[in-house]
Amino acid sequence: MTAPARGFSALRGTAVTVRVGLWLGVAIVICTVTGLISHFIQHPQPWFWWPTRPVGLYRFTQGLHVISGIAAIPLLIVKLWSVWPKLFARPIFGGIARQLERLSILVLVAAVIFQLVTGLLNIAQWYVFGFFFTTAHYAMSYVAIGAVLVHIGVKLPVIRRALGEPLGDVADGGSVGPSRRAVLAGTGLAVGLATLVTAGQTIPWLRRLSVLAPRSGEGPQGIPINRSAAAARVLQTANDPAYVLTVAYGDRTRQFTLQQLQDMPQATHRLPIACVEGWSAEGEWTGVVLSELVATVGGPTDSDVRMVSLEPPGPYSRTVLPARHARDSKTLIALRLNGETLHIDHGYPCRLIAPTRPGVLQTKWLSRIEVIPQ
């Protein structure tokens, strides 16, 4: 009766651990790189450059960020299962190399669990933690990167040896039980299933299968929303008949009523809106080309542009649009969505919609557009 147990525990070998670890490493690298891209779009550095084409590029990178993060969850569970007994093997402390290895594992596991858990909570918009998500998530990514590098450096000889170790068709010792190949196949199946039931919020043709995706694609005018007009406290100001949009460059200003904006030449483009939570959807947006509005106050085409919302001051009530996006012909001050007047939850009376930008930076309920002097 003990043979199956011995065979089962033998599955927790370095051959399985290393292979699952490699898959997990790939998922973490993809998740980290795409996450850093999103961070630097929202908090640009002088060296960072982000294009306006293809228009769905951010939809792809941020969707990949969330998909790879979710895929990492079953991989992390199997990885921890495979190494759990080794964490308590004697000697507990050992030499410096062993202590360094254990410390790197502790930091790595803690950092990865923190990133995955807070990332999942952010996708669901359930902010039960008492800190600002983006700052903490960004800072912890560097902790995870450092721990991964230390862990790989310490374990590199073991990794090389384990990759050359055959998996075998049955558990060690010839006992009856699942094979190592079966464990890896089951892990792959779990990763595929986790992807299928969540990736539809990014990949439209998977939407019907993604029963656990937090964004179904439903919402006003066929586009989901994260923040309603009521939550933003703009219901009164957005519906004010005296509403005007102010466009400013230095001491030059122009004010446009909603009717005047509607009377200007209109452009229509099919553009995706993609949020940091991983969901995205396409819509047909109609409005005034931003560069044409900027031209009314003599603003240069190579300047960044600040968007100011009717919202009370907050983290995203003001955003800055880089010059390359501001002068792009597909960047609109949108007045209509999918052939209808913009729904108030989508930013009525007007909002920004620009290619390859996070949804949180596609400022809604615009009150003012400022060309930033160079």
Image (cartoon, grey):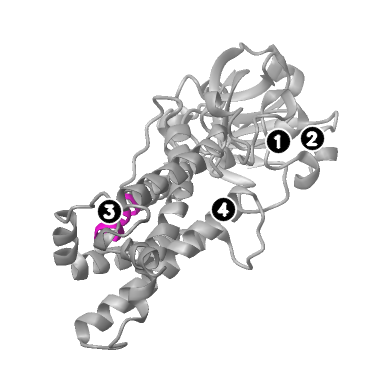
Q: Mark 4 = which residue?
A: 120
Q: Residue at x 76, y 27 (%)?
A: 343
170 left or right of 127?
A: left
Query: Between disc 1 and disc 3, whose residue precedes?
Result: 3
Q: Please tell me whether mark 2 or mark 3 is closer to you in this view.
A: 3
- Location of residue 225 by image quarter: top right
Pointer 2 and pointer 1: residues touching (CB < 8 Å)?
A: yes
Query: Quick one: label 3, few (<14), some, or many (20+) residues within 10 Å?
Result: some
What is the secondary structure assignment of the residue under circle 3? helix
Residue type at mark 2 is Ala
Q: Which residues are magenta?
A: 15-24
N-term-proximal mark, 4 vs 1: 4
Whether 10 is drawn above or below 335: the answer is below
* Residue type, label 3: Arg
The residues tagged by marks 1 and 3 sit, at their Cα atoms, a distance apart of 50 Å
Q: Quadrant of residue 85?
A: bottom left
Residue annotated with mark 2 = 238
Q: Which is more N-terminal, label 3 or label 4? A: 3
296 or 45: nearer the eye?
45
On the question of residue 27 being in view, the answer is: no
Majority secondary structure of magenta residues: helix
Circle 1 is placed at which residue position? 365
Q: Residue at x 72, y 18 (%)?
A: 260
In percent of width and height, residue 20 lies at 32, 54
Q: Which residue is mark 3?
A: 19
Give the quadrant of the C terminus. top left
